Image (tube, grey):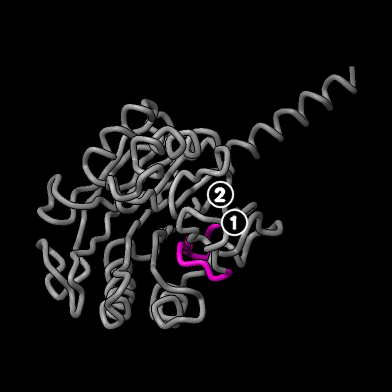
Amino acid sequence: MKNTIALAFLLCAVSLIARAQHPFMTFNIRLATPTDGINQWENRKDRVAETILWYGTQVVGVQEALHNQMVDLQARLPEYAYVGVGRDDGKTAGEYSAIFYKKAALEVIDSQTFWLSETPQVPSFGWDAKIRRVVTWAKFKDKESGKVFFVFNTHFDHQAVVARRESAKLLKKKVAEIAGNVPMVVMGDFNASPSQEPIQIMLGAMTPKLEEARLVSQSKPFGPTGTFNGFQASETSDDPIDHIFITPSWRVHKFGTLSPTWKGLFASDHFAVIAWMELP
């Protein structure tokens, strides 16, 4: 009888721990373009969806997603909904930096998109960038625990040095204004490695205090350090450019850079990055 009670207690405890550890993912899915040949979207969309589903991802920020890609993913992710708009018109034109989330687990309290520019409230180009860049955010309530947190998802410019620096400054300013002291996750493709200025700004003294989830994981990070593969393993750098930043209120149990292939073919030219986290 005692053994039965002890086993029941252990199973209950394991169940509670499993429920508390929620996987958060950032994934640059590569825009749909026929110039990618065998790696074009039609050949990859199932791989992207399978990657999200296999890990039971609760929240995933996607980058470079055109509207037709959002439609394709939504059809393959029926348990998820998303927030986000196209960066070119604030509706459906241009790439999204959208946030998919599990509908059964999370409630969206509020959500908006702003532009990484001097006029963030309207579709616009920022500083020396030739491409519009956005941040989509959502305020979530966990339906089971009642805990509230924010998720910010973005994609910094890949060429404009000034825009990357100023985007990091603006992002930190805006997350402080929007989220205040509420726990937050700031994720995306920052097109910058840890030694470069944009990441130093993200992790710097400017409020709020953020940490790199990879560096505070309680278990050793899994997979390669670099996150860009260019559809070829040989192109994978040792420097990550896709990041998950968190406020210190989060506990990171596991962190991984996911690098599976399907007979040598990739889901995207970036690896998905994932962290299992909880709010104690």
Q: How many marks?
A: 2
Numbered range of the magenta stretch: 238-252
Indicate the quadrant where residue 83 lies.
Answer: top left
- Looking at the rendered structure, the kind of residue marked 1 is Arg
Q: List x then y, in percent, for residue 261.
A: 56, 43
Instruction: Specify the farthest residue to the top.
Output: 1
- The residues tagged by marks 2 and 1 sit, at their Cα atoms, a distance apart of 5 Å
Instruction: Specify the farthest residue to the right.
Output: 2
* Residue sitting at x 56%, y 56%: 233
**Residue 140 or 46: which is nearer the viewer?**
46
Indicate the quadrant where residue 230 lies.
Answer: bottom left
Mark linked to residue 251: 1
| 278 relative to 108 in the view: left or right | right
In the displayed structure, 253 sits above or below 118; it is above
**Residue 15 or 53: which is nearer the viewer?**
53
Q: Secondary structure at mark 2?
A: strand
| 255 relative to 75 in the view: left or right | right
* Residue sitting at x 58%, y 69%: 238
Q: Residues within 10 Å of mark 2 (few under 14, many from 20)?
A: some
Look at the numbered discs 2 and 1 and tell me whether their residues touch, using CB distance below 8 Å. Answer: yes
In the displayed structure, 137 sits above or below 119; it is above
- Looking at the rendered structure, the kind of residue marked 2 is Glu
* Residue sitting at x 17%, y 71%: 130
* Residue sitting at x 24%, y 49%: 111
Q: Secondary structure at mark 1?
A: strand
Q: List x then y, in percent, for residue 77.
A: 38, 30
